[in-house]
Amino acid sequence: MTTEASKVPSYLVGMGCAVDMEGEKRYNSGMFRFWLKPGEKANIVFLSDGNDVPCIWEHQVMLYKKGKKDYNNYFTCLQSTFGSCPLCDYSTEFETCWRQKVQLFTILNLNGYFSKKLNKQMPYSRQILTAKKATSEILMRKYAARLDQNQRLRGAQFAAFRGSDSKSPNVGTEFEFIKMVDLGQFPPDDVKVLDVNALAPNRDLMIRTCQILRGAANNTYSGAMAGHAGESTDDVVSVEYGDEHDGQLPQGNSAVE
């Protein structure tokens, strides 16, 4: 029986461990916010639980901003909400920016970073760990293991390690459980999970972005990215999830936009 509480917005694929993570066979452009270099590891604490992590179809777009390549542009696919999607049309035509099914886990990355704004070392940062099918399967097994111990995924600390293969998932290939963490020791705002309302698709912004992408492609060469046509894209900013870190990335990992 479907109740109001059990309904999910149309732009979500679903919620939690029951989501089918079988995706479309598309080009993998690497769209993770939290990431590890090959051979790197990080201690992380999950804020999302296995039964409430949101799953969406998402596009990642590379734009030129201030003359530099910027990959931190993420757009929730419009297909489910509007029946069509400008970026899906663009990806079919130019064979790039394919949508991908992802689960968005909120985590604390315990690898610190130096904040220029505050002029001090920060001990952790709240980030989004983006999991596609293979990583989702691993994390759901970790979730099940916590349940077997009468625990939850939320509050569980893991050592995330990425193998040396450059093609391995850059959020990690191994997740070793360390301990359960008392989240009460952190400020309440620092342990909040991602608000699913932040994932609502922005149709006007996507259309604007596609106009820039198509303009660049038509004026330079097929598949060219925005900025090559001489048009500034500094005003094109995608939905940002989570914290801002005054441009500083946590050591060894990318902060949420």
Image (cartoon, rainbow, N blue to C red):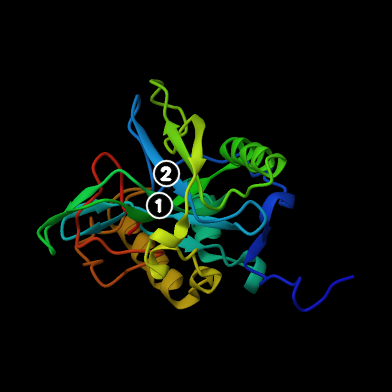
- Residue that extends furthest to the top in the rendered view of this protein: 164
> Which of these two is toward me, 244 or 58?
244
> Which of these two is toward me, 77 or 212?
77
Residue at the spot 37% in from the left edge and 59% down from the top edge: 73
Label 1 neighbour load within 10 Å: few <14, some 14-19, many 20+: many
From this view, report whether residue 9 is shown above or below residue 16. Answer: below
Q: Amino acid at mark 1?
A: Leu
From this view, report whether residue 87 is shown above or below residue 159. Answer: below
In the structure shown, which secondary structural element does the residue marked by tag 1 occupy?
strand
Query: On residue 164, which mark appears?
Result: none
Quadrant of the frame with the N terminus: bottom right
Q: Is residue 239 visible?
A: no
Quadrant of the frame with the C terminus: bottom left
Q: How many marks?
A: 2
Task: Provide residue 96's location: percent of width, then percent of height.
Answer: 46, 47
Residue at the spot 47% in from the left edge and 66% down from the top edge: 192
Task: Provide residue 190's location: percent of width, then percent of height.
Answer: 38, 64
Q: Which residue is mark 2?
A: 44
Residue at the spot 42% in from the left edge and 44% down from the top edge: 44
Disc 1 and disc 2 in contact, CB within 8 angstroms: yes
Query: On residue 108, which mark appears?
Result: 1
> Which of these two is toward me, 108 or 88?
108
Which sits earlier in the primary sequence, circle 1 or circle 2?
2
Q: Is residue 38 visible?
A: yes
Task: Provide residue 100's location: percent of width, then percent of height.
Answer: 56, 49
> Which of these two is toward me, 143 or 240?
143
Q: Disc 1 and disc 2: Cα gap in Å? A: 5 Å
Q: Quadrant of residue 56?
A: bottom right
Q: Amino acid at mark 2?
A: Ile
